[in-house]
Structures are given as structure tokens and as C-alpha cells.
Amino acid sequence: MAKKQKLTSEQVILVKNLYIKCLTWPAILAEYNRKYPHKPGTKRVAVENLRNAFRNRYDPSILEKRLPKKAIILGKTLQRIKKPAAEVWAAIEKIVGHPLDYHAVGRILRDSEEEVYISQGQIIVEPRKVNLNKGSFFISATIPSTEVETVRSDGTVVWKVNTNRPALRAMETWLGERGKPKRSPIFFPMRAHVGALVKQPHTYDAVIRKYRDVFATDVTLNNNLHLFDSQINPQQIQPLTGMNHIDYWAGSDVDPDPNKRMSLMIASPKQALLTVAQGKELHPRIMCSMGTMSVGSGLYRKERIGRIAEALHNDGAMIVDVDGDWFSTRPVQFSPKDGSFVDMKKRYHADGRITDERVRGITPGDIHLIEHSPLALDTTIDQINYFEPDDVFLQDLLTWITISHHVSKDSLARRMIRKQIGFLPDEVELAKSYMKMFRERTNKKTRLNVVSDSNHLGHLDKYLKEYRFIKDHANEDLAFDLYPAFSRGLNPTRMLIDSDKDLLACAIGGKYGKNDYNWLDKNKDVWIDRIQQNSHGHLGLQGARGSKNATYTSYGRANTGHTHNPFIFNGVYGAGTHHAIGHDEDVASPAFTDGQVRSWAHANIVQYTGGMRQLIFSVKGRWKL
């Protein structure tokens, strides 16, 4: 026998995977059946026991104590099994450089495992706080890998890898961008997707080993954001279910803030996001999952739950900007073609290039002009001018609060509205002035689209349809002038805003006036890269009450508004609001929300070429480093 030599890390990885391949090879069962034809009922149990023991610990002495004798004999005869398993064993011996027996392989695996592999036992770290006062984190999950695909006759190993290697290189391009605050990656482990991976030791693709120092399962970034691995099944359709029960308190363990809970981010191959209220004055908590650096295609079982999981799998990550106790989180998705991704209108490529990216559209949170927060509106205008999108899709552009059924039976709210705004004619003039200001301050090349089928724009339709103006003497003159146009099927909101002539003349002519806004037809779809833009989200199937699931069922992928609670639900993104909310600035909240606890937030949806999207939050007007 040749002199024993110390194996390199790469050689040990090859030996380990080839040997596991031997143990799972169908020829093993055939050989056992040939050697022990009189005990066919025990062959599968013996082989499964052998597999389990090797998966948990590569110690031959343990094997001999715990496994049936015939299973040990079967293991020792592996090198004598005919093709194809014999080729695998020959490949192992070729790597090592001399013949091996069963116990020798066990010693190699036992002695080398800890220094080579990133195992789940090693990457689980104590809870820690990352000391980065100002910078950005690229956060993604990864799953066990390093499975042998096949072994050629010459001993060459063909690997089956599930790490998105182009995306990993694109991430390195992002990390190395010059002129930016410090950037760091964080990788979270998570369970494997299928039995073939679960039955292997918890090891990770060799290409990601150099990042073992940034593997983590429990991380506190600042007093407002905590990240952890919740050990959920990757096939779980909604990974955030029940996460609102988990509390991490702001401050320190010694001196926690009794009134403030932290936002949470968990490891999952799906990107999901929602906001959770925490009182009347504090900003809501953000709950989100990060997506994965592991490719989902072909990793799930071809059964119902596996097919659903593959359809919802997100190759992507969350980018978190941190500055003291301020943070902002936004998702990125990896291109299926080359692994590149887009962040803040720049595309990061695997070959090191950074290119400008075209922004196809922005869907701001519900605008609600007149009731809007000036700071929130200024922030959105800033974003539109920064991203320079082709289109902006405006949800709930107006409120029509002076005739809204939300306050029709609230005498105190109506009195306050009339003091602050006046009546419907006054609201129309205010709306026109704000819309003019919005157009003048935004990029002139950007087309401003009004989502006509927004529920607050529909308040005027309902007011006219129900003849409520008959008893509303302060507004009846304008309503009577408007009704002929409405009765002919024209959009009453557009008539009030666009018409620069007599409303009756416009109704007779059946035409709108000229305006700088494009009013979308409520009965038409508007798709950009297979994502629906012309859906507010307040209506469900057959006119029922709207919901995230109804929107997803109807369109698959869509950008919506309505709820004022930013969210990511499967392929549906929901924007926030521009309402003045108490935890952002000292401006009065809408009258109909007086005393309520809300999970509203300021957040806009940015969509790039190819359907990549980011949900960008702003807190007190700040949305980027």
C-alpha cells in the first residue's frame, strides 16, 4: 500500500461526496439482494441504517456497534460492487492515491470533517450585534449543497451545485463599488428542499466557503432591526405566518425599551414583507423574509407542495442600509439569465460591470392630495426625479373628503373638514393646484398616470349615484352641473379636474378637457413586463372586497395600493400611503382615523426592466444613505 498522505480540503470534499453517492447508489440494493437472496425483507432497512449512520457521524466504531452485522459487511463490499458503483469507488482511490477499505474512508471523513465543512453545528453562532454605525448589508439565505451529479469513466467528477454563482459574483461587484459607505454580506443557513439534500451532511457549496465568517443565525443590526433563522420549512407558502408573536425589544438586554419592539427579518427562500402596528405613535414594525442565494429550479419535489414552493421561490436578497438606529430595507432579485441584479437604478453584473438601469415605473403609496403629508409628497417627488421612470402610476390621487361617505354621518369630522378645506368646489380648486405643482416639480419626461379605479376617486361616483347631493345644499350646484356628464358614462373626477369649460358643454360634447395627466381606463389592463399596473386592490373577484390573495389570484404579479400597509405577498407588491401619520411628523391624521392604531407607512414601489422590483421605505423623509 502506498504511503498515507494528508488530503487537501478539495480532496476531502470529493471523497465525502463520492462515498455518499456510493451509499445511495441503487446498485447497493442489487448487490445486497444478490448476496442475501434469502432475506429480501431486511435489505432496505440495513442500507438505510448505514446511510443514517454515515450522515450523522463518520466513525466506523460507532457503525459497528449500532448497525446490523450484515449492513457492515455490505459496506465493506462496496469497492467490489460492479459498475456503476465500482467507478465511484475507483474515483475515490484515484483522488487519495492508493487503495482504500471501508474503515480507511471512515477515518478520512471523521478526521477531516471539522476543518473542511461549514456544517450547521459550526455556523450556528451566539447572538451578536454587528457594530457598523453606517453602511449597507447584503443579506441572503443559502441551503446545503455539494452533491455529486455524476462521475465519468475517467474519474472526473461533475458537480451538482445549487449556489447561484453568477449572482454571488454580482454581489461581489456590489460589495466592491467605490465611493459608497462600508458594505458587508450576511448569509443565513436554512433547511434543504428535498430528500436528496436532507440526507447529506449539512454542508455548503465550496464556492461560498470563503464567506463562512459571515454565516449567522441570530444578528442584531441596531436598536430597530433583528435578523434570525427561524428554522421554517422552505416549502412553507407564507413564511411570515405567526411572526408577529415574536418579540425582540429595542435597547439592550440590561435596559430594554418597554414600549418599542424591533423589526424582524427571517431566513426563507421566499421574499415576503408586511408591517405590524405597535401603538399610536411609533413607526410600525417591518416583518420580512430575505430570499435565497440558492437556485430553486429542480430542487423541489414534483408534487403539489413542491411545485408551489418552486413557483414562489425567489432568487434574491434583502439590502439593508444602517445609520445609527435608522435603517431602510429593500429587496433585490437575481436575473435568471446572468445572475445580475438591480439596486437603486444600477445593475450589478457578475463580470464586475456596473451599468445604469432603465426604470419602467414607480407606484407611489396612495397620494390623497390635500390630506397628504407634505414631507411624504416631497420625498416621492425626490424619488421620481432620482429614478427618472418612464411612468408613474398614481393610486388614490384625490380623496374627495368633502363628500365622502366615510364622514357623512360624523358631524364633528364634517365640521373640521369644512373649516380646513371648505366644500366640494373648494376641494376641486385645491386638487387642481396640487396636481399642477406635482407636475411642475417632477421630471417632464415621466408620464403621470392616474389609476382611475381607486376607491377614493370612486367616492364622487357613489355620491352622484346615490343622489346624496340633493340633501347637500352646499355642493348641489356643482353636483347638478356634473351629473349629466356622469349619467353619460364619463368619469366625474376627470371632468372636474380636466374641464376648462362649462361642465354641461363638456357633457354634451362627451369630451374631457386637456390635462397633463393620463387617466387610465378602469376596464383596461396595463401590463409592464407581465406585471399589472392598473389595479388599486380594493376590489376582489366578482366585485367582492379586495385582498392580497384576490389580487394575486387575478393577476399573478401586480403593483397595488389601497391598504396603506406596504407588503410583498407572492407576486403582489403593495405601496404605502402619503397620509400624514402621527409617527412621522407633527401633522393631523385623517379625520376618519381619529384614535385608531395603524400599521401605515410611507413606501413606494420601483420597477425596473425585466420585472425586477424594489419596495423603498422612507422614515421622516429619509429613504437612502
Image: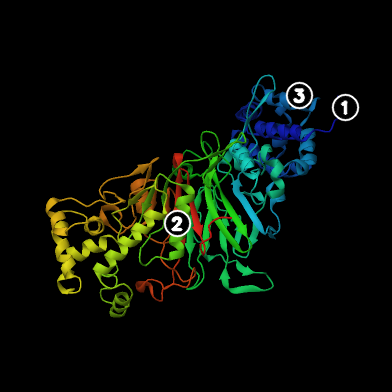
Instruction: Tell me the SS state at disc 3.
Output: helix
Q: Quadrant of the N terminus?
A: top right
Cα–Cα gap, marks 1 and 3: 14 Å
Residue that badge 1 annotates: 3
- In the image, 12 versus 243, the foreground residue is 243
Q: CA distance from mark 2 to mark 1?
A: 71 Å
SS of the residue at dot 2? helix
Crowding around mark 2 (Cα neighbors within 10 Å: few <14, some 14 to 19, many 20+) is: many
Residue that label 2 marks? 380
Please determine whether, in this image, residue 584 is positioned above or below residue 183.
below
Q: Amino acid at mark 1?
A: Lys
Q: How many numbered callouts?
A: 3
Kind of residue at badge 2: Thr
346 w.r.t. 132: above or below: above
Comparing marks 2 and 3, which lies closer to the viewer? Answer: 2
| Residue that sits furthest to the top in the current view | 154
Q: On the image, which quarter does residue 134 sit in?
A: bottom right
Where is 195 relative to 422, above or below?
above
Residue wearing tag 3: 94
Q: Is residue 75 left or right of residue 144?
A: right
Q: Quadrant of residue 454?
A: bottom left
Residue 298 % position (x, y): 52, 36
The quarter of the rendered structure image containing the C terminus is bottom right
Tag 1, which secondary structure? loop
Earlier in the chain: of badge 2 and badge 1, it is: 1
Q: Is residue 557 above or below residue 455?
A: above
**What separation in Å lies between label 2 and label 3 (alpha carbons)?**
63 Å
Mark sitting earlier along the chain (1/3): 1
